[in-house]
Image (cartoon, rainbow, N blue to C red):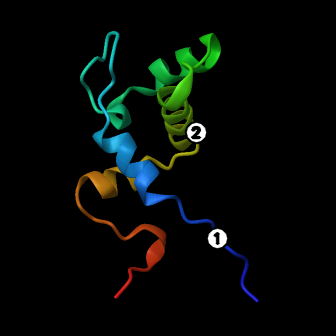
Amino acid sequence: MEPHTPVPDPQLLMDLIKTPMPFGKYQGRPLYTLPEPYLVWFKQKGFPKGKLGIQLETLYEIKLNGLEYLLKQLASGNHGIGGTENK
């Protein structure tokens, strides 16, 4: 039996691509384009409450673990996440 490889929730990832940063230095930029040092700063100071905080913390973990390519694939229209596509 092969070990189960978790597949990221495509909707969560799409939200990171489509949602603009609502405030601050990077206001208006899609969340997934935020620089890693900015996310590290939030990690140290505390993520905002609510959905935005969850999104930023998720993005921090994605970037920390070198998984940005997943977001870049989705943003470019290449939706082959998980190695298989539904046919």
Task: Give the left or right position of residue 46, taking residue 17 as reference.
Answer: right
What kind of residue is marked 2? Glu
What kind of residue is marked 1? Thr
Which circle marks residue 5 in the picture?
1
Q: Quadrant of the N terminus?
A: bottom right
Q: Quadrant of the C terminus?
A: bottom left
Which circle marks residue 61 in the picture?
2
Task: Give the left or right position of residue 23, taking residue 36 as reference.
Answer: left
What distance separates the C-alpha of mark 1 from that of mark 2?
A: 17 Å
In the rendered image, the vertical position of residue 7 relative to residue 83, given as above or below: above
> Does the CB distance between marks 1 and 2 fall below 8 Å?
no
Task: Give the left or right position of residue 68, taking residue 20 as reference.
Answer: right
- Element under label 2? helix
What is the x, y in percent for residue 7? 55, 65
What is the x, y in percent for residue 47? 57, 20
What is the x, y in percent for residue 64? 57, 37
In the rendered image, the vertical position of residue 14 relative to residue 16, given as above or below: below
If you read the primary sequence from the N terminus, does the residue marked by circle 1 or circle 2 appear first?
Answer: 1
Instruction: Please count the marks in the image.
Output: 2
**Point 57% across, 21% down: residue:** 49
In the rendered image, the vertical position of residue 9 relative to residue 4, given as above or below: above
In the rendered image, the vertical position of residue 16 relative to residue 39, given as above or below: below
Q: Quadrant of residue 26?
A: top left
**Point 41% across, 55% down: residue:** 11
